[in-house]
Image (cartoon, helix red, strand yellow):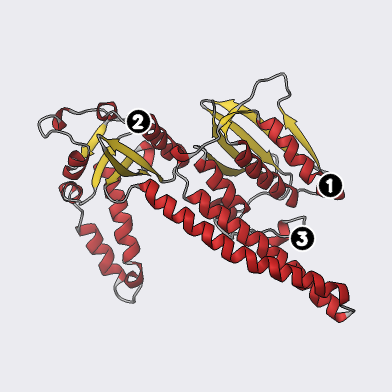
Amino acid sequence: MSSTGLLLLTAFGLGAGTAWLFKPGLRQRTRRRLRRFTMPDQQLREWIETSPQGWVVINPADGLANINERARALLQLEASVTPQLQQLDELEPSDDVRHLIDLARNSALPQRGEWTSGAIELELRVMPGHEGWVALLLQEGTPLQKQLEQQAQWVSDVAHELKTPITALRLVSDSLALNAKERQAVLVGRLQKELGRLQVLVSDLLDLSRLENTPVDENRGRGAVDPRDVLIDVWNTLESLAQERNVGIQVTPGRDQALQAAVDPARLHQALFNLVDNALRYSPEGSAIEVAMEHWQRWCSISVRDLGPGLSEADLERMFQRFYRGDPSRARNAVGGSGLGLAIVKQIALSQGGFVRARNHPEGGAVLELLLPRP
C-alpha cells in the first residue's frame, strides 16, 4: 500500500510545482532538493489514519492493507477485532460492492455506490490504483439515492424548459420555409439544420446527465438479452445510410452459438446504435463493418470494427470524452453528430455494470469494444 500511495502523492506534488520548476536558475537546485527529500512511509500512514473520511486500502489479492480510524467507526468494527482482520471477505461486503471493486480494476476508472453498515447507508467511492491495488473511500452524509433523485428531478425540469422553446423555433422555421425564396430559403435551410443539431445536442446532454447519475445497483429492466437481436434492429435503422456508400455489415458468431448479456435492452440498443453509427462514419465505400461477439470470462464482449484509417494516440486517450472529435479528414461521412455519442456509450456501459475500450486492429481500422456482464 505504501508504495502505491507514495507514487500518487509524489505525482500530485510534481504537478503542483510545474509552474515554478521551469523558472530560470531553479531547475538544477530543484533537482538536487528532490534527490535529498523522500517522503517517509510513516507520514503517509498518519495522513490516512487521521483523515475525516473512511479509508480501506485493498491489495491485489483482496487483502486488507490499511483501515483507518474513521472507516473502523463507520463500519462499526471493534478496536480489538480490527488488527485481526486480514481479508476483504471479513468485512462482509455485499455483491454490489465486490462488483464495483472488480469493475474499477478492469476498467481502471473510479466507481461509486453504497455500502450498508447496519442501518447506515454509506457513500462509497472505489478508486483503482496500480497493479490491482484499490482504495475504498467511505463517508456519511445525505444518502446517495436522495441526491440522485434530486439531480434527476433537476434534469427533468431542464429538459422541459429547453425542449419547449426549441420545438417552437422549429415550427417557426418550418413556416418560414414555405414562403422563403432564393437567398432567404438558403438562410432558413441553415436555420432548420442548426435547430435540428441543437435539438439532438440537448437530448444527448440530458440523456448523458441521467446516465451519469445512475449508479450500478440502481438499474432496472435488466434481463438475459441476445445482442444479435438488438443489432438487427439497429442495422434496420442505419441500413439506408450504409447503402448510400455501399457499406455492409458482418456479424459473428452465427445463431449456432449461444450468446447473452445481462443488460437493459433499450440501453443496449442505444449503445450499439452509437457504435455502429460511429463505425459507419469512418468506413470506406464498399467496405463492411465487422461486429464480433463472444463470451469472455464473466463478460459478454461486443466489438465493432471499421476499416478506416484507425485511431491516433489522442483518439485512444480522449475519444470517450464529451465533445471530443478526432481529425475530421478521417471521417468518410461529412454529417456530424452531437459529439456525445461515444461518451453516452461509456456511461451506458458503466450504468449496466460494464465498460468500453478502444484499440487499433492489427490489420487496420479501429475497434471499439463494449463489455457487459453475463447473466
Image-quadrant location for residue 32: bottom left
Answer left or right for 373 relative to 275.
Answer: left
Tell me the kind of residue under disc 2: Ser
Task: Report whether residue 313 is seen.
Answer: no
Q: Which mark is residue 334?
A: 3
Residue to which mark 2 is pinned: 94
| N-term-proximal mark, 2 vs 3 | 2
In the image, which is nearer the foreground, mark 1 or mark 2? 2
Residue to which mark 1 is pinned: 240
In the image, which is nearer the foreground, mark 3 or mark 1? 1
Front-lying residue, 267 or 30: 267
User: Residue 30 at what x, y percent from top left?
Assistant: 27, 66
Distance from the alpha carbon under mark 3 to that under mark 1: 16 Å
Above/below status of 229 relative to 186: above
Residue at image x 64%, y 51%? 311
Image-quadrant location for residue 81: top left
Most extreme residue toward the bottom, as rendered?
183
Answer left or right for 162 relative to 292.
Answer: left
Within 10 Å of disc 3 (Cα), the crowding (few <14, some 14-19, many 20+) is few
Most extreme residue toward the right, as rendered?
182
Front-lying residue, 133 or 167: 167
User: Residue 252 at what x, y percent from top left?
Assistant: 71, 29
Within 10 Å of disc 1 (Cα), the crowding (few <14, some 14-19, many 20+) is few
